[in-house]
Image (cartoon, rainbow, N blue to C red):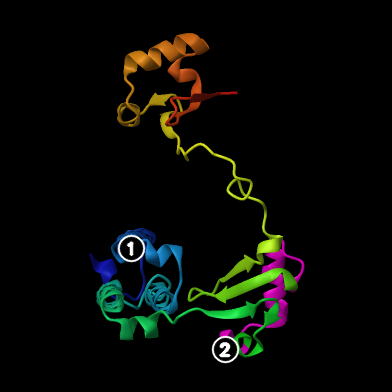
């Protein structure tokens, strides 16, 4: 365990062990912090990401720095991060500081220049985000909102929105999310049984489609019992 402490020199194996332990430690740390730290970078998430990366980077590049101290420091920071998250969930005062409320950048085709400065973005950046959403005219925007994670939500004026089945008074079938019952030639019996089917039913489908499970790349079933099969090419 000498590689945990600062050394004049480290062997190749010791460098590898440091990297492996740091990698596993960060994976566990990210899992403990939750999916929020992966899916979005708000103020506290961005801050903790910068600090953690900086702390563990040094002992991975400097043999004279011990790894133990970095792991302890990182653990303390993770605990502080979780305390801040739970505090913001429980008390609104802290939530507003960690996760400031969104505010409008465009209202009925008019740019809120003061809020642009508050968000610290330029007109060019705003236009770039519009192009990403395939919106060529600011006048089409009923509302554009600056979100706490640094993204912009755009809402078109009603006259520029696409027609929906509700607008045309059409009755649509209920949404059905397909279950994956076969993937890469292997049957997922848990998904099969949850869909209300059994192996005998699946074998019957195999005979209809003249296919074997090992020949199937992907097979799904929806709420209407429609099965779709994609074979290996």
Residue 131's spot in the image, x, y percent? 72, 66
Query: Which residue appears at 37% of the width and 61% of the height?
Result: 35
Q: Pointer 2: what residue?
A: 118
Q: Earlier in the sequence, mark 2 or mark 1?
A: 1
Q: What stretch is highlighted in magenta?
A: 117-138
Q: Pointer 1: what residue?
A: 34
Query: Which residue appears at 73% of the width and 73% of the height?
Result: 138
**Is residue 82 located in the magenta-colored stretch of the structure?**
no
From the viewer's perspective, tell me whether residue 68 is left or right of residue 215.
left
| Secondary structure of the residue carrying numbered label 2 | helix
Q: Is residue 133 visible?
A: no
**Is residue 134 located in the magenta-colored stretch of the structure?**
yes
Residue 178's spot in the image, x, y percent? 45, 35
Question: Alpha carbon of mark 2 to alpha carbon of mark 1: how far?
Answer: 29 Å
Which residue is situated farthest in the right direction here?
A: 136
**Which of the two discs, 2 and 1, sits closer to the camera?**
2
* Neighbour tally class for label 1: few under 14, some 14-19, many 20 plus, Cα within 10 Å: few
Which picture quadrant has residue 82? bottom left
* Image quadrant in which the N terminus is located: bottom left
Which picture quadrant has residue 232? top right
Residue 57's spot in the image, x, y percent? 42, 73
């Amino acid at each position: 365990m000498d590689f945990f402490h600062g050394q004049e020199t480290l062997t190749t194996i010791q460098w590898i062990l440091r990297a492996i332990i740091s990698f596993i430690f960060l994976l566990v740390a990210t899992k403990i912090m939750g999916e929020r730290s992966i899916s979005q970078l708000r103020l506290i998430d961005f801050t903790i990401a910068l600090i953690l990366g900086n702390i563990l980077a040094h002992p991975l590049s400097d043999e004279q720095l011990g790894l133990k101290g970095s792991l302890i420091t990182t653990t303390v920071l993770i605990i502080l991060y979780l305390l801040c998250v739970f505090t913001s969930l429980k008390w609104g005062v802290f939530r507003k500081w960690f996760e400031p409320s969104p505010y409008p950048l465009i209202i009925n085709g008019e740019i809120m220049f003061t809020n642009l400065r508050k968000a610290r973005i330029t007109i060019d950046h705003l236009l770039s985000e519009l192009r990403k959403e395939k919106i060529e005219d600011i006048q089409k925007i009923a509302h554009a909102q600056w979100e706490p994670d640094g993204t912009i939500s755009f809402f078109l004026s009603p006259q520029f929105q696409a027609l929906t089945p509700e607008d045309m008074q059409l009755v649509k079938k209920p949404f059905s999310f397909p279950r994956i019952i076969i993937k890469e030639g292997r049957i997922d019996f848990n998904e099969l049984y949850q869909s209300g089917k059994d192996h005998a039913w699946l074998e019957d489908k195999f005979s209809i489609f003249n296919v074997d499970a090992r020949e199937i790349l992907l097979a799904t079933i929806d709420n209407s019992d429609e099965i779709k099969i994609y074979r290996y090419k």
